Amino acid sequence: MTTLAIATWHARPQLLEEQIVSYNAAFEDDVVHLINVNADFHDSFWREARDLQVDFKKYSNLYFLETPVRTYYAGVAHAFFIAVQEAIRLNINFDYIYWHTSSDLLIKKGIANYIRNFDVGFGKSHGVDLGYKVDHRGYLLPNFDHPDPSAWLKAISEDPQIAQVLKAMNLPKLHKSRCEGSFFSRQVFFELMYPLTMHVSVSSMASPPKAYPLEEYIFAQCVEFFCQRNVVKRAPHVVSTSAAPKNIATIAEIEKSFKSADKFGIKRFTNELNSDERNLVREYLNLPLIGSNKGSSALAEM
């Protein structure tokens, strides 16, 4: 059994290769990657990979969605579910599901054993009061008694399908939390996500009335609903988010995460392959440092 690691990408194949290398080292090869390359950028991504001589075929534990799907800002949850479906279709023998972004790196080993101590890796979320209203069409909609609702809350309040999901769980608050660096045991994942998948198809997730990050709100809601009703071994996310300017990880933040008992990665990283920050990660993982040759794959000799 292994961990299924899912991420979405749209550009910079060299950075994807760097991420694959870091994850393989951190998981000590107990991981399978399933990547969606945004359908809108699929051709340009692979053209860039050929131009830079990035050879993904040498990674036997790396798969790409055979039919890539379009993702967009605040619209990636559907790709996550499609990737899980694709893994099942491909008969990938996984027992954990791990979701991350294109901007993170794992920085130390031990994560494969760590996550198997838990059912869910999803930090505590925060919430706003949740109610319901019926619009002029007779549709039930979420309603938030908030003096200054965010654009996301406004979008959610116009989605009748999500109203059915929220009503089925009937929690007094709408919860929110980031998803990158979260993980679930396979057994728990399908039961936990059932309130969502029972009411909303994957294709509907891709095109709500107005865009909002379903994975931040509704995933958090499903997690809280499940954990309140079951005896669950729960951990926080294993990836921290940089608090530095532009959320670009610093040496100090990487060192802090390395020393943390429950953090194994950090986002975001600079796009420079040979940066001091990226080389520190490679040093922690006992990987060769990256040179300054940017004209070809910096990892080609590995």
Image (tube, rainbow, N blue to C red):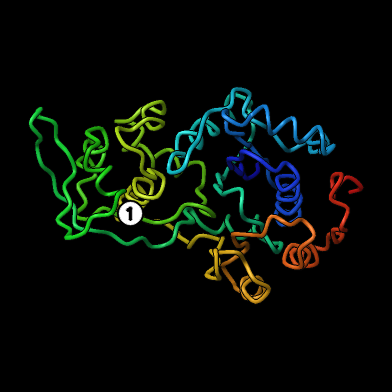
In this rendered view, identify the residue nearer to me: 208 or 166.
208
Judge left or right: residue 205 versus residue 266.
left
Q: Secondary structure at mark 1?
A: helix
Q: Nearer the viewer, residue 294 or 55?
A: 294
Residue 6 is situated, as x and y percent measured from the top left of the image, at 59, 42
Tell me which residue sits at (62%, 73%) in the image: 253
Query: Percent from the top left, x then y, of residue 27?
Result: 70, 53
- Quarter holding residue 242: bottom right
Q: Quadrant of the N terminus?
A: top right
Q: Nearer the viewer, residue 11 or 177?
A: 11
Q: Residues within 10 Å of mark 1 (few under 14, many from 20)?
A: many
Looking at the image, residue 27 sits to the left or right of residue 128; the answer is right
Q: Residue at x 53, y 34 (%)?
A: 84
* Residue, far right: 301
| Residue positioned 25% across, 36% down in the render | 159
Front residue (pair 234, 79): 79
- Find residue 188 and report its horizontal and vertical position in percent: 44, 44
Left or right, residue 47 beside residue 165: right
Q: Number of numbered discs present?
A: 1
* Above-or-below relation of 95 to 139: below
Q: Quadrant of residue 214?
A: top left
Residue type indicated by callout 1: Glu
- Above or below: residue 280 compared with residue 65: below
214 sits to left or right of 131: right
Q: Which residue is mark 1?
A: 224
